[in-house]
Structure formats: structure tokens, C-alpha cells
Amino acid sequence: MNAASFRTVFEDLEHPMAMATPSGRFIEVNKAYCRFLGYARPELLEKSVFEITHPADLDCARTLFKEVADGLRDQFHYQKRYLRKDGREVHARITTVWMKGRESNHPVCIATIEDITPEPTHVSTFEETQISQSLLENIDLGVNLVDEEHQVLYANRGTSRMLRKDLQEIIGQKCFRAFAKTETVCRYCPGVRAMKDGMPHSIEKEGRREDGSSFIVNVQAIPVFDKDGKSRKFIEVAEDITQRRAIEKELKLNQDRIDYLAHHDSLTGLPNRTLLYDRLKLAIDRAQRYKEQLSVIIFELDGIKKINDALGFDARNQLIKDVSARFKANVRKTDSLCFLGRDVFGMVLDKADSFQRSAFVARKILSLLKFRPFFISGHELHLTASIGISHYPEDGRNVESLLRAAESARGQARENGGDGYQYYQAEMENRSRYYLRLQGELHRALEKDQLTVFYQAQVAPSEGKLSGIEALVRWRHPERGLVSPAEFIPLAEDTGLIVPLGRRVMEITCQQAKQWKDAGLLPFRVAVNVSPVQVAKGNLKQTVKEVLNETGLPPEHLEIEITEAVLANNPEKTLQVLTNLKNMGVTLALDDFGTGYSSLGYLQKYPIDRIKIAREFIRSMLHNDRDAAIVESIIALGEKLGMGVVAEGVETEDTLDFLLAFGCTNIQGFYYAKPMDGKTFSSYLKDWCGAHSACPMKV
């Protein structure tokens, strides 16, 4: 850096800085230094450091400068008081570095000053002393004064409580003997380091008491300076953090447990669909990078429903567990065996460089099932499977297309009678023609307003009131009647029709909600589901704003319901979209929590108001302790984070009782009400008011 550049930087620094000779005469000062002391620059350049130093601190300052002049130091840190031009006293922490001048061998001091002047107080010196002493003796920290021989010169009551010893037993002891029951100075002793470089240092270590009990302590050592500027003592501030570390450890274990439960099937212990998705994505990335191939295998066990009907649910579960255990013992770990639910398994064959490899694995699956029977409830069972296979890159270049191709091939294998495997064939024309026709009909459905919305109640049982409504789209096909969303929503997402379709559903819902509000029947929210495609490709903020303006529905009555897939796709854009909606006053709910890309980080990062427990867990928790544990953990998590929790898919009183025992406050499902069209649901709202003392209008 040249002289001009240095001068500019020096002048513009926010911290006060000065340059001086060993005799204390100023060479240069910056603007901040002048402001700090109230002098003009020419005035300071005519003075020495000692002329503006408080008389009580002069000896220390002169000693330090003399040691530099004698070559005993090349830097020092100390605290002192200055006298401003107006006579006021100011306190400073000073750090100096001494460098050789360009034109002479005399060192030049470059000093950085930190203003540590205490705030003005109306408390007398006597009162300050009393407050400090009272605070020192009653604070829940150990505070000790220790000399350079590590002898404790002073200890407060906090130290006595921490070590469970009388003060007389502590004062006079070596600090390492008092705290750690050792005879040597601890490694990386913060006190030694603090006295050496004049700066505070800290360490976390294990302490040990006379009774043999141990504790975790955080020790901070602060140097104490003599008048000559040297540190021969230090203040030791000790905090017992044993309980804090225990809580952190427990939280870490709980986080690990929740993460495991969220990514593994509770019945089989195998990775679930989420983990299969992640591993397949990694495998595709690797295959793209190294120009490799891979295969996806999806297979289902044939005839499981008949076994369930004949032997019961418990026998069926035991069979699934036994099948999983056999597969785990007989396939490579690198093949990523996963359980996808019900009776379906998946595998990713990394580096599968030929059709023969996938065929070999498929035949191995069939032989493991057919030729080695399973013994369940006294019955000998021989199983078969329907297996679908897709290959990268021939059948798809991303996770969704490869899984879809394998699923399609599995369906074909099942239609062929099971007990075999089927490669995906792009010319499976029947299905393709069907979806092509359905796409055209969906276009016409939007044009002719064939979409309708059904509504399902959310109930707060403990309060005896409705707590919300979910809007569910239906398609009134002129020939086929009501078409399930499971049939046309994926098609709408694939074709982009989900954007206008989603807007139309929101318009219908908000118009209906405004009518209920005007009738005094809507003090709560109406939830509208939003697809990941709407967030990624549609201007969701503008859509919501326009629909609310057009319908006149206040934003606090609208809830946008998203799935975890939305959060996993383009997180930065998603966060911006959700934050904009939140700022508008719209509530945000996270649907199917626990089955997709579950992460506690999402709840922390995104402005989510409510979480909805996936119905898969609700259905199985009565028969599966691990699913019950997941449900209980999610409810507790929602309560801790101040989020509402909704359990959907509740159909029986036993399920309801379980959820109420876990503290769930919002219930949705057939137990209370099936989805209804707008007219029927309007009557339902009025009837609810008549049948319940806690009418929605009075909430």
C-alpha cells in the first residue's frame, strides 16, 4: 500500500488511531481520535501522549513507552484514562504495535483505541461498591482472583456452591487442584494465556469435586494489569454448564431419532421412499458425471391382501418384516433396498451397466421368495412378486421419470399375472393414449367450468368447535361423474394445467368463504392446497392477492397448504414466495408432515403456522408403536414451536382417543365429517351452530 492509500484508510477508520514516537510525541492522529478527545488535529500534534493522560495513569504509560525505547517490548495492551480538552475523563483500551520507521531506526507506535468509558450514573461510589459486592457474592457463577503461581487469592460464594466446599478450603489452594483435583496446570490454561498476551481466554473442561462427582465448567480468564502494565494475576469466571450440555445431548439424540424415524420405515427398519428418492438422485448425478448406467427396481409382493384377510393384520406385518430381513441379508448394501409402504419395495442398482444385471437381481428376488418358504402363525407361505424395471438414461433422466417408469412396468407385471419381472416399455400405448385423452378433457373441463370444490371440516374436540376447513377439488366429468384428484392432479402438474386449475379452485373457495363470512359462519380459516408447480412456475403471490381482492375475503381467513416437496424444490425462491404470502396475512400449513422430505430445519427456516400429520401415520399408529412415537413427537414438536397441529384421516374413536391423549388439538377425517359440496357444507355449518353451544360465530 502506498503512502497516499495508507493515509486515506488511516483517516477514514471509525476507531480512534494515533502514531507516536517512543518519547510520546504524536506523529499523526485520525479524525476519530480527534473526536474522541475533543481536540483539533494541529493541537494534538503539538502535544505528547503523556500530556493528555490522566495523572493516575502516567507512571504506567511512561514505563511502557520506556520499555519500547529500551528494546524490551514491541507491542503492549493496556487500559488507561485520558483527559479530554473539555476536562472530562474518558476510559480507553489501547492496543499498540511498534514498527521501525522508514527514515530511521527509531520505532514508531501505531495505537488503536477502544472507548470503554462507563455510562453516566446517578449512583454514588459507595452504592456502586455495595451493588458490585452484592452481585459478586450472589451471582450463580464462580468468580476467583488467581495469581501467576495459580494460587486462589479470592473466591466468591458461587465458587463455593459449584465445588461444594467452604471458601476457607478454596482460598489459598492452587486453582487446578480446587477445580480438577490434579497436581499440574491444565493444558491450554486460559489464565496462562491471558497473562501472556493481555487478552481474555476461555476453555471448557471437566471439573471434579472432593466427593468424586464431575461437572462440566466453562472458564474464562481475564487479565489483571499492574500499574506498570504487566499482568501477574487474572480473574477466573467459571460457569457450571453440566445441565446445559446434558440438555443439548438429549436434544441431539431426539433430533437423530426423529430424523431416523422420518427416513426409515417403522415396521421394517428399511429406508423409506424419502431416502430412496435421495439415493436415486445421487446415483443419477454420479451416472451423469461419469457416463454410467443405473437401474431402478420396484416390486410388490403378490397376494398379500389374501394373506391379510386370512391370517390377520399382525400376521401380515410379521410377514413383511421377515421378507425385509431376508432381503437385507441377501442383497448388496450398495443396491439401496427400501420399503415404500404396504407391500412394495424399491431398489437402486448403481453402476448397472447392462440389462442382464437388473434381470439377475429380479430373478434373485423371485427365488428368495418362492423357493424358501416363510412360516407365519403356523402356516408355510411361498410368495411371488411383480417386478418393474427402468433404466437410466433410456427410460428417464430424473428421479420422477425413472420411478414412474418402474411403477408402470410393475403394474404391467401384475397385469401379466405376477410372479415375474417386466422392463419399462415406452410403447405401453394404452396408458399413454388414456392420459393424452384425459389431458384434452381436462383442458375442456377448465373452459366449461366442470371443476367443483368439496369442503371437509377440521374440529377442535376439546373446545367443541370447528377450527378450520380444507377445500378439496373434484372434477365433475360429463360421462364419468366425479373424477378423483389422484387421477388428474399429477397430469395437471405434468402439463402445467395445474396453474390455471389451482387459481380456479382458489377463486371458488374464496367466493364460498366470503359468503360464509357474511353469514357469520366463518371466524376460522379455509385451506387451499397448492402444488409445487404453482410455487415454481406460477406467480402465486399475485394470484392470491388478485383472488382476495376480487372476492373480498380478508387474508386472515385463507390458509395456503403446501407439501414438503414444495420446500425441497428451489428453497430460496420458495422462502421468498412464502414470506410474501405470510406478510399479506395469509396462514401457511405444511401438509403430509413426516413422509416427504421431513427436516426440522424447514420448520425453522420457513414461516409455517400449522403442520398436518401424514395420514399414513394416523392409520397405522394403533398397531405400530414406532408410528405412534412419530405422531406423538410431531405433536410435541408443534406445541414447542407454537405451531398448530392437525391430524388428518381420523376415522375411528380409538384413533381420536390416541390423538387426544397425545395432546392433538385439531382433527380432520371421516369420524367427524366427509368432504361435502358447498351447498351441503353450508347446511352442515348451520346445523353445527344449532347442535353445539360453541357455535363458530362465537369463537
Image (cartoon, rainbow, N blue to C red):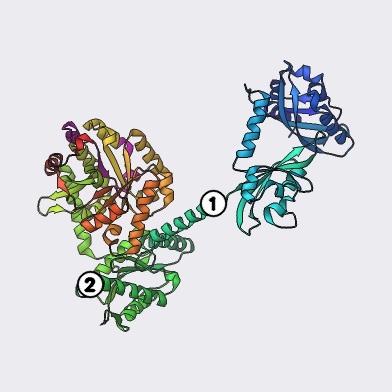
User: What residue type is disc 2 on?
Assistant: Gly
Q: Which residue in the rendered view is the most extreme toward the left?
A: 479
Please state the horizontal and vertical placement of residue 637, each as a whole percent of the image. Answer: 39, 50
Residue 22 falls left or right of residue 492: right
Tag shown at residue 171:
none
| Residue 283 in sight in this render | yes
Q: Which residue in the rendered view is the most extreme toward the right?
A: 70
Q: Nearer the viewer, residue 275 or 697?
A: 697
Residue at figure coordinates x 37%, y 47% from the top left:
639
User: Regarding mark 2 in the picture, which secondary structure is present there?
Assistant: loop
Please state the horizontal and vertical placement of residue 605, each as a whole percent of the image. Answer: 43, 44
| Mark 1 vs mark 2, CA separation in Å | 48 Å
In the image, residue 653 lies in the stretch drawn in magenta: no
Reading the chain from its start, which is encountered first: label 1 or label 2?
1
| Residue 471 in sight in this render | no
Residue under label 2: 312
Q: Quadrant of residue 377?
A: bottom left
Tag shown at residue 243:
1
Residue at figure coordinates x 69%, y 57% from the top left:
181
Q: Nearer the viewer, residue 448 or 567?
A: 567
